[in-house]
Image (tube, coloured by chain):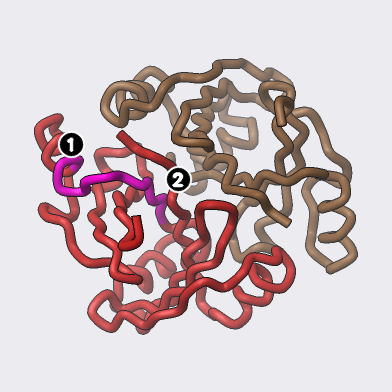
Chain colours: A brown, B red
Amino acid sequence: MFGAIDHIGVAVEDIDEALKLYSEQFEMAIQYRETVPEQGVEAVLLEVGDGHVELLRPLGPDTPVGKFIENRGVGMHHVAYRVVDVAAELARFKSLGLELIDETPRIGIRNSTVAFLHPKSTGGVLVELVTPADH
Amino acid sequence: MFGAIDHIGVAVEDIDEALKLYSEQFEMAIQYRETVPEQGVEAVLLEVGDGHVELLRPLGPDTPVGKFIENRGVGMHHVAYRVVDVAAELARFKSLGLELIDETPRIGIRNSTVAFLHPKSTGGVLVELVTPADH
């Protein structure tokens, strides 16, 4: 059961240019910024109500987000739904025959617990399940 | 100022197949279903917390969503942010130099008030501003 749309992930090439749009023009408060070398991204979280926008800048062309931009261009990258127990949801979706990217939960940005479902099983949408660290 | 992520729009080719995923497997309650010939779509709203997922099936290949699927495939189509006054936000974004798809607000599904910003101005993301009818 999904509690909310936790965030949308947006692939960008230039974080500062994106922040001009999201922070200055859209007036979203910057909540967090982190570089995650093992995922090949610099990420910025911005507040929008109870949810947020996650800007993702690839650290290089051979990263997952770098390849996404090469194939599809900048823009919406994934949607993350907030859940209470990522492992339990993964087990349920696996039993339903959905294809998982992550077989077990892993640590995401800001110490959240996350896992991704494969867009092949979800109508072309890259779906993240997330339990924020502070929830 | 955006109050929340109101919904994400997802382009689909087969509503019943998509409902199997979103309603049965993701366990989102179906909130509303409407065919909007002037926009060339059949739309279904599903609940996820305070927000929702909007499934969009094009009524034909020459519709905006039909062309989107031809160019990009099925998947995430737009993100909608909830605002109090769509017209005021449009005026503000126009004054900031953003490109608008809708110069004035129009009626969206379920009698909401909506307008779209052009993805050229928003980093490749099709952005909708929406005031739900019941807010």
Comes first in the chain, label 1 or label 2: 2
Q: Is residue A36 above or below residue A4?
A: above
Q: Which residue is mark 2?
A: B5
Does residue B132 appear left or right of residue A128 in this picture?
Answer: left
Q: Which residues are magenta?
A: B78-89
Asked where in the image residue A134 lies, by quadrant, the reply is: top right
Left or right of B58 in this view: B20: right
Q: Amino acid at mark 2?
A: Ile
Q: Depth check: give the residue in front, A94 or A92.
A: A92
Q: What residue sits 73% from the left and 26% below the top?
A: A133
Residue B70 - label: none
Q: Position of residue A4 (x, y in %)?
A: 60, 48
Residue displayed at 80% across by 53% down: A100
Q: What residue is at 45 percent from the left and 45 percent from the top?
A: B5
| B83 within the magenta span | yes
Residue type, numbered disc 1: Phe
Is label 2 in a helix, a strand or a loop?
strand
Q: CA distance from mark 1 to mark 2?
A: 18 Å
Between A92 and A15, the one nearer to me in the picture: A92
Q: Which residue is mark 1?
A: B93
Chain assignment, label 1: B
Residue B116, above or below B106: above
Q: Secondary structure at mark 1?
A: helix
